[in-house]
Image (cartoon, rainbow, N blue to C red):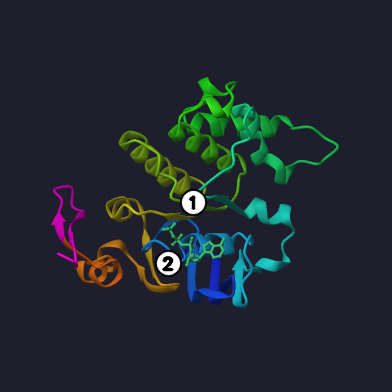
Amino acid sequence: MSASTLEVNHVHVFRNKKLVLQDISFTAYEGEIIAVMGPNGCGKSTLLHTLNRSLPYTSGSIQVQQIPLQRYSRKQLARQIAILPQTHMVPEAIQVRNLVRLGRFPYQRFYRGGTRKDEEWVNAALQAVQLTDKAMLPVAELSGGEQQRVWLAVLLAQEAKILLLDEPTVYLDMYHQLQLLQRLQTICTRFRLTILIVLHDINSALQYAQRILVMKAGKVVACGKPETTVTPALLASVFHIQSEVVRLKSGGQAIIPLSTDEN
Ligand SMILES: Nc1ncnc2c1ncn2[C@@H]1O[C@H](COP(=O)(O)OP(=O)(O)OP(=O)(O)O)[C@@H](O)[C@H]1O
């Protein structure tokens, strides 16, 4: 049995006095990818930001590696959890390599520059997202998809055990979507990471996640193995769409969304 890395118990979160997460409970384990799915505005991003302590919760508890979230210093927490938010502010002139170096901040002291180990992690992260050849360019000169990959490199350089990824495939073409998901799968297994990834593409979730956590209106409505969790009945009740399951020759299954309930 793998060790638990995140334990979330009965968590409630308010934003602007509105209850946006209600009684959230789940446990995540090392070596697994959990896809977080749900309609727009159901609280997926809020959940990731709460786990990263950038948003406060009002009741319940969150444990990271069996230690309460609030006990960590900012740097200690950054060694455990790295987040890729949905949107980023790109500092105009910063070079790709220098941005990726920022991922090493939890390991650096203010009076000392980067070490050889820091540079090795930066190189490995750039290589993992295939941007070594663009390392010296200003980030602003890269395409949207390439910038997304730079941010992923920042995250990888952070060397954290838990990765929280908010729609990381959104600007990527099909090749880079598949490549990113395959690489996440490889690093997740190899380094025993825990990855929570917000995905809107149901078939990517079916193919790459060990479990799917489904949210609706601020609540977790299901959390389990992809094939048994994401059924046409669940999609009808959560997303109000009609869909059909297709068995694949490879042994897995895919879901074809057919129409909305309005039809
Ligand atoms: N900065 C904010 N201040 C106040 N309320 C917010 C803020 N950001 C989001 N909310 C509210 O919190 C709720 C959950 O939003 P959240 O962004 O977590 O949803 P989401 O599931 O990630 O949506 P999407 O799929 O559109 O990205 C929504 O009702 C939203 O209006």
Point 48% across, 36% down: residue: 149
Q: Of the residues shown, which amino acid type is indicated by label 1?
A: Leu
Point 72% across, 62% down: residue: 72
The quadrant of the picture occupied by the C terminus is bottom left
Count of marks overlaid on the render: 2
Q: Which mark is residue 42?
A: 2
**Residue pointed to by mark 1:** 165
Which portion, as a residue range, is magenta?
Answer: 244-263
Point 68% across, 34% down: residue: 118
The Cα atoms of the two marked residues, 2 and 1, are separated by: 16 Å
Within 10 Å of disc 2 (Cα), the crowding (few <14, some 14-19, many 20+) is some
Q: Where is residue 255 drawn, in percent x and y?
A: 20, 57
Magenta region's main secondary structure? strand
Magenta stretch contains residue 169: no
Q: Is residue 77 left or right of residue 142?
A: right
Q: Where is residue 85 drawn, in percent x and y?
A: 53, 50
Q: Where is residue 155 drawn, in percent x and y?
A: 57, 43
Residue 11 higher or lower than 45, as above or below = below
> Residue 108 appears in which quarter of the rendering?
top right
> Residue 17 appears in which quarter of the rendering?
bottom right
| Residue in the foreground of this view, choosing between 9 and 144 | 144
Q: Where is residue 239 drawn, in percent x and y?
A: 29, 66
Sequence order check, earlier mark of 2 and 1:
2
Local SS, label 1 = strand
User: Is the residue indicated by label 1 positioned so its CB lies within 8 Å of ligand 1?
Assistant: no
> Residue 41 appears in which quarter of the rendering?
bottom left
Q: Of the residues shown, which amino acid type is indicated by label 2?
A: Cys
User: Is the residue indicated by label 2 positioned so its CB lies within 8 Å of ligand 1?
Assistant: yes
Local SS, label 2 = loop
